[in-house]
Structure formats: C-alpha cells, structure tokens
Amino acid sequence: MNDRRGMFDAEKKDDGSFQFTVRPPKLDFDVKPDSPLAHLLASQKEMLLAFRSLLDGAISAVDRAGASGGQQRRTRIDID
C-alpha cells in the first residue's frame, strides 16, 4: 500500500486491475476566494470531476456490452 497522503491515489495491481483511493480534504478554517488554498480546492474538484468522468465512461461501456448482447439468454416458450 502506498503511504501517499494526497487526496487522490490510483494504483495498478499485478492482475491488471486498478485501485482508486479518494480522501476528502480536512478543512477546519475559512477559505478566502483568492487565497492559494482556494486554488488548491478548485484543482481537487477538477480531479474529482475527471474521476467521475472516468467512472461514467466505464459504466457506459458496461451498458453497451449488455445492450449489444454481451451475454444473451434464450427463453424457450412451449405453445400448447
């Protein structure tokens, strides 16, 4: 496991899968609009939006695979 303390971490496993870790920032103070911290928070938000886009793409790919007959089932109906 990585000891990084950033907000977002992605690690590729030996089996080819990815493990994503998202840690929300701890804020116990007011953030002024033009402070460097405000810019840091905006960049963290952009990272989360990019991650959400990645997840949306993966979900769409799964939906397309299901809709295009990735695993179709046949149903037999006996008519008397």
Image: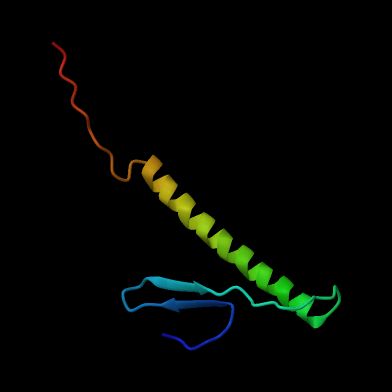
Report the residue at 19% width, 21% height from top.
77
Above or below residue 64? Residue 39 is below
Q: Which colour scheme is used?
A: rainbow
In this rendering, position of residue 46 left or right of residue 72: right
In this rendering, position of residue 15 left or right of residue 27: left
Question: Residue 41: x and y, percent?
Answer: 72, 74
Above or below residue 34? Residue 77 is above
Question: Residue 76: x and y, percent?
Answer: 18, 26
Quadrant of the image for the N terminus? bottom left
Above or below residue 54? Residue 75 is above
- Residue at the extreme bottom: 3
**Front residue of this view, candidates 29 and 53:** 29
Quadrant of the image for the C terminus? top left
Above or below residue 17? Residue 68 is above
Report the residue at 59% width, 77% height from top.
7
Count of marks placed on residues: 0
